[in-house]
Amino acid sequence: MKKIVVIGSSNIDFIMKMKQLPKVGETVTDAGFMQVFGGKGANQAVAAARAGGDVWFVSCVGDDDITPRMIDNFRKDGIKTDYIFREKNISTGTALIMIGEHGANFISVAPGANYRLIPNYIDKAAAIIKESDIVILQYEITAETLKYVLDICEKHRKLVMWNFAPAREFDRKYLGKVGILVVNETEAEILSGIAVTDDDSVLKAAKELKKAGCRTVIITLGVRGSFIYSDEASEWVKAFRVDAVDTTAAGDIYCGSLATALTEGRSLAEAVRFSSAAAAISVTRMGAQPSAPMRKEIDSFLASQFSNGRNGTSS
């Protein structure tokens, strides 16, 4: 089985679910509370593993009492945890999440040990990176470490999928080391400098990002679906319509399951349909990692959509 290596963040999520998100200075009562595990890297690792992938996770966590349970959960999902490094006297990354109507959310993250994932730890994981078939990155680790990983992957000719999230300042010259760039419309705008407002601007932004060096660009646009742009394709893949209750980790579920589909030899469009189905299932559930579907759920969902004529084909 082909190896997926996810390098990135692990968080403990504290979630409040309410009817309406508060305005500045407003207190909203009668919220529901849950504490789950999250972090963009961890979410993508869990999503890839539950979708059927052979996943290795490289991350850095703190010495919180709850962290061993988080690592045990990774193992239960079949994720290899040999390269999860534990730092003393610092907390694991922490996220505070408020979720309102239709899954809209406010999120604040304290990086904690995520910023302790330094190049020295990446060197310790070099062997599994060299054995990988695809490496998944996000941007909840430091820019220094991200660039270091991209340099290593380029040296060893490894396929990198980079989810530019959360969007923040980055040296665009490194985009030439990215095989598959996954961005939503806001992230595409920040990285390309082109406001993404309609189909024409989606294409312009994708062209600009490919011109910057990315071999394949995927722009996700929520209910509008995904746009794929590469030398081989310029294609829309429709989204699946569901009733969303929490969209917090939808992009992470999308990326993790996309990697699994690609390692199984699916075409890019087929892989995007698969990942779109996984993301659609996830937004009907609360929490980040708890929302990631198992493989049989994704297959069943796709089968039901095709039997009903809602097959997510290109428009």
Image (cartoon, rainbow, N blue to C red):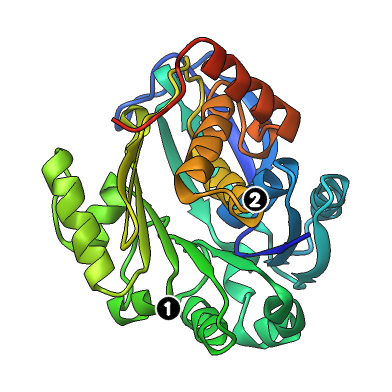
Foreground: 34 or 265? 265
Q: Write the residue at 14% across / 50% down.
A: 195
* Disc 2 packing (10 Å; few <14; some 14–19; many ≥20): many
Tag of residue 260? 2
Q: Would residue 67 be found to the left or right of residue 215 on screen?
A: right
- Please say whether residue 249 is visible from this viewpoint: no
Residue 312 falls in which quadrant of the image?
Answer: top left
Whichever of callouts 2 and 1 sits on the residue coming sooner in the sequence is 1
Residue identifier under label 1: 177
At numbered mark 2, what does the secondary structure look like: helix, strand or loop?
A: helix
Q: Residues within 10 Å of mark 1 (few under 14, many from 20)?
A: many
Above or below 9: residue 237 = above
**Residue 270 locus on image (x, y percent):** 51, 41
Q: Would residue 25 appear left or right of 39 to someone viewing this image?
A: left
Q: Position of residue 165 (x, y in %)?
A: 42, 56
Residues under labels 2 and 1: Cα distance?
21 Å
